[in-house]
Amino acid sequence: MSETRTRAHVFVSGTVQGVFYRASTRDAARERGVRGWVRNLDDGRVEAVFEGPESAVDSLIEWCHTGSPDASVSDVSVSYTEPEGIDGFHIRR
């Protein structure tokens, strides 16, 4: 039986830009087999969409609370929707 797939829309606040947060998120996602994308927002937050097996997405969301070594995360906001079938994991600019 295959695990339920999910899609999480994530916003991360704190010192998360200029600290390799996006690249680290991409690497962490690929390690977990999660698909999606990540990008910086003009307001200083990072936005991401994760799709994959529920346990892998949950693991990546947990990782987001710490993030890259130089990040200082103050908040992680998550909402869930139906997966759309994203291919790969990309950094959006």
Image (spheres, rainbow, N blue to C red):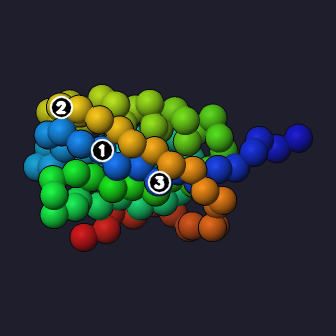
Query: Which mark is drawn over residue 12?
Result: 1
Residue 86, image x, y percentages: 57, 67
Three-letter residue code for mark 1? Val
In the rendered image, which residue does mark 2 sit on?
72
Q: Say whether residue 25 is left or right of residue 79.
A: left
| Label 3 environment density (alpha carbons within 10 Å; few <14, some 14–19, many ≥20) | some
Q: Quadrant of residue 64?
A: top left
Looking at the rendered image, the quarter that the N terminus falls into is top right
Residue 88, image x, y percentages: 51, 63
| Label 1 environment density (alpha carbons within 10 Å; few <14, some 14–19, many ≥20) | many
46 is higher (above) or lower (below) than 54: below
Residue 75, image x, y percentages: 29, 35
Q: Quadrant of residue 83?
A: bottom right
Q: CA distance from mark 1 to mark 3?
A: 10 Å
Q: Nearer the viewer, mark 3 or mark 2?
A: 3
Three-letter residue code for mark 3? His
Q: Secondary structure at mark 3?
A: strand
Three-letter residue code for mark 2? Ser
39 is higher (above) or lower (below) than 34: below
Q: CA distance from mark 3 to mark 2?
A: 20 Å
